[in-house]
Amino acid sequence: MSERTGLAGEAEELDAADPLAAVRGEFVLDDVTYLDGNSLGALPAHVPGRVEDVVRRQWGELRIRSWDESGWWTAPERIGDRIAPLVGAAAGQVVVGDSTSVNVFKALVAAVRMAQEDGAAGADGRGSGGGGSGSGAGAVRDEILVDATTFPTDGYIADSAARLTGCTLRPVLPAEVPSALADRGERTAAVLLNHVDYRTGRLHDLPALTAAVHAAGAYAVWDLCHSAGALPVGLDEHGVDLAVGCTYKYLNGGPGSPAYLYVRRDLQHRFDSPLPGWNSHAEPFGMRPDYAPAAGAVRGRVGTPDILSLLALEAALDVWDGAGVSVAAVRAKSLALTDFFLRCVGAYVPGGRAESLTPAAHAERGSQVALRCDGAGDVMKRLIERGVVGDYRPPDVLRFGFTPLYVGFADVERAARVLAETLTG
Amino acid sequence: MSERTGLAGEAEELDAADPLAAVRGEFVLDDVTYLDGNSLGALPAHVPGRVEDVVRRQWGELRIRSWDESGWWTAPERIGDRIAPLVGAAAGQVVVGDSTSVNVFKALVAAVRMAQEDGAAGADGRGSGGGGSGSGAGAVRDEILVDATTFPTDGYIADSAARLTGCTLRPVLPAEVPSALADRGERTAAVLLNHVDYRTGRLHDLPALTAAVHAAGAYAVWDLCHSAGALPVGLDEHGVDLAVGCTYKYLNGGPGSPAYLYVRRDLQHRFDSPLPGWNSHAEPFGMRPDYAPAAGAVRGRVGTPDILSLLALEAALDVWDGAGVSVAAVRAKSLALTDFFLRCVGAYVPGGRAESLTPAAHAERGSQVALRCDGAGDVMKRLIERGVVGDYRPPDVLRFGFTPLYVGFADVERAARVLAETLTG
């Protein structure tokens, strides 16, 4: 038996033994091997019917009554509570709405304000839930640290948040955050980090980095775009202060579905939003000229939520209610898929033609594999023509995302095989 | 013939002669008299099919390819160009996305920055398209004026914009804006006004107020939520600097459909967004760590657009392509509807039971009628039970919105009749 036949056979066995294999049937998929769910998740098969009901009945027939009767008004916090368990948060701390960029802005400005308020109070005002020892009590906190390898929008928005709050932005590699904080952490107000690097798929150490931020008396803001729905996050367990994430990747919410914001419960009364729209008012229909913020996660809302996109997302989240579907099960399969892909690539692709940028250690790996290769943009075009859909990130990276809910081991073997044929053909 | 029979008969004649009467057939309506289109527009009948195609085919089958192949990526500016003619703007100046609140924030912060830049330049830097004479050249512009009767979110967001840019917020009645500017206009950076008052339906004098703002060397930001799609706005003609508006009222885009931002062409190169997300980058897929803003209206984009809501809006705008449908025709019918409603109320409702807050003069009237009456909240509940849907705004206002595309004169007569019966029953 050749190596090729061996891996194909092994894929068959792995698929047969996969406890999540049946979930694939809940998605609309064809004969394409879809490894771009880390950019846009596939369509859950029951979503079109739900969207049709929202449009035809809720909007078309009930019209304005649906704000109450169809639960439109409370959708941002209700759907937030559906996402909460997927990121390790108790209910009441996640609200859905706006884009990831807008939520990064809310979170960072609010974090800086809390840090500066702590300083003005001359004491560790972070509250009992904070992990920091308040080493910098009384200092002027006027620096924001941002992951130097971040998805660009986080950096652009962090720069704007810094400019508007009188802070300096300091890009730092995630691994160097502890030493940067040791250097002048008493000046640090907030640190914005990515849980998983969008380009390399590297998983950063959220518990340790959050602890380091807290030890410096600063606030940790995590971007979960490339981790939520693919691996355990543990926001509550690790004492994360604020977090944001998108819902159209591993949560399959649909193109441009709204993002979410997590504000840890004991910080919510101090969450001072730079976007205090009427939806976050304590009494939104009081139409009062003065702003009074609502209690709880609702304080993170801004304007009227985009109901069609929101309710498509709500429907998509039903997939997580299925028997045996859990973040733990997804993570186990994700690691098995990426392990198997790395093995298949190693076996099929001639040495030196594609180098993995994704860490071999499980503790450092998200749910994607990034391969550096010459002419990556052109290679990806040819892969897509042959039915293997990943994506390309400049200058030389092929990205393959593995959504365990619908990607199987045969997909993995096929992708590696077609890649090898493309590179050697 | 009784007065009642007379008005009902007149309604029938008016409907028979209405050039827009046939457009009603393009909407999903039942036997309810729907006078709440100024809160949520009715569903255009062709929208569900279009949304289904977006979900099933574009998302479900093409998946990630739709960003290019289905035109998702360019939707914000493409749909902006569909809205532009409805607000009197040439193409390339309107972009769709985010909520009205978020767009108010972008516009106001950008306006303050331009005003302060003008001051720093020590000359009238507003450019040839600006209406202002630059009387305050070199002065510190650190005040934002806001309509004191504004829909609350604009005031909350203006307060946040003022706080983040080191300005003071000064609430002023629209009628008093000219005298406020005469008082200390050299300090004014930006003025945020509503074209139509959400509560009373009063139409403000956009040309004269914009000219007054320009004469003071400040920037005019207009909120068009209650005027766009109901009456002519004339953004280009009147030299408005920046404008925002929602799309779910008279534009029938659906619940929470995204808002839009207008930036006058000659100001676009100076538009310095406080929310510089990756979608507004000159080269968004370059994934560069440094921000470089795109040219044109695209500079107003932020994060990934919510495609489902956006494309439902795009479909809804097709109604405006119909034969005979124009802003001028809509405005003519709107005034005829509100005139007729005021006449019917005058004829049916006993004197003193409901007082109109909406100006009698056409030049001062939007497309709604607001009636002040005792127990308005309870009265509206009873109207809705009887199939006449308007809404209630505290403390004592009944609002009736007239969307000329689907409201007829028989609806108007019925609403006034049921109101009279409710008030006297």
Image (cartoon, coloured by chain):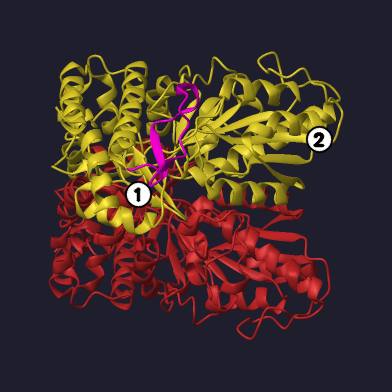
Chain colours: A yellow, B red
List the residue tagged with mark 1.
A391
Q: In the image, what residue occupies the spot 21% across and 62% down? A: B408
Q: Foreground residue, A64 or B278?
A: B278
Asked if residue B349 can be seen in this view, the reply is no
Q: In the image, what residue occupies the spot 51% across and 62% down? A: B300
Quadrant position of residue B96:
bottom left
Residue A13: give x, y in percent of width and height: 17, 20
Q: In the image, what residue occupies the spot 18% across and 39% down? A: A53
Q: Quadrant of the C terminus of chain A?
A: bottom left
Q: Is residue B354 magenta?
A: no
Residue A51 against residue B200 in the figure, above or below: above
Q: Tell me, yes or no, whether the two marked residues, 1 and 2, touch with CB atoms within 8 Å.
A: no
Q: Is residue B215 left or right of residue B239?
A: right
Q: Is residue B85 left or right of residue B172?
A: left
Q: Foreground residue, A156 or B405?
A: A156
Q: Is residue A352 magenta?
A: yes
Crowd class of label 1 (few under 14; some 14 to 19; many from 20; radius 10 Å): many
Looking at the picture, which amino acid does disc 2 mark?
Arg
Callout 1: chain: A
Say which mark, if any, is on residue A187. 2
Query: How many numbered dots are placed on residues in this image?
Result: 2
Asked if residue B44 can be seen in this view, the reply is yes
Crowd class of label 2 (few under 14; some 14 to 19; many from 20; radius 10 Å): many
Quadrant position of residue B362:
bottom left
Residue A36: give x, y in percent of width and height: 31, 43
Quadrant position of residue A382:
bottom left
Residue B392: give x, y in percent of width and height: 40, 43
Is circle 1 on the same chain as circle 2? yes
Looking at the picture, which amino acid does disc 1 mark?
Asp
Q: Which residues are magenta?
A: A350-371
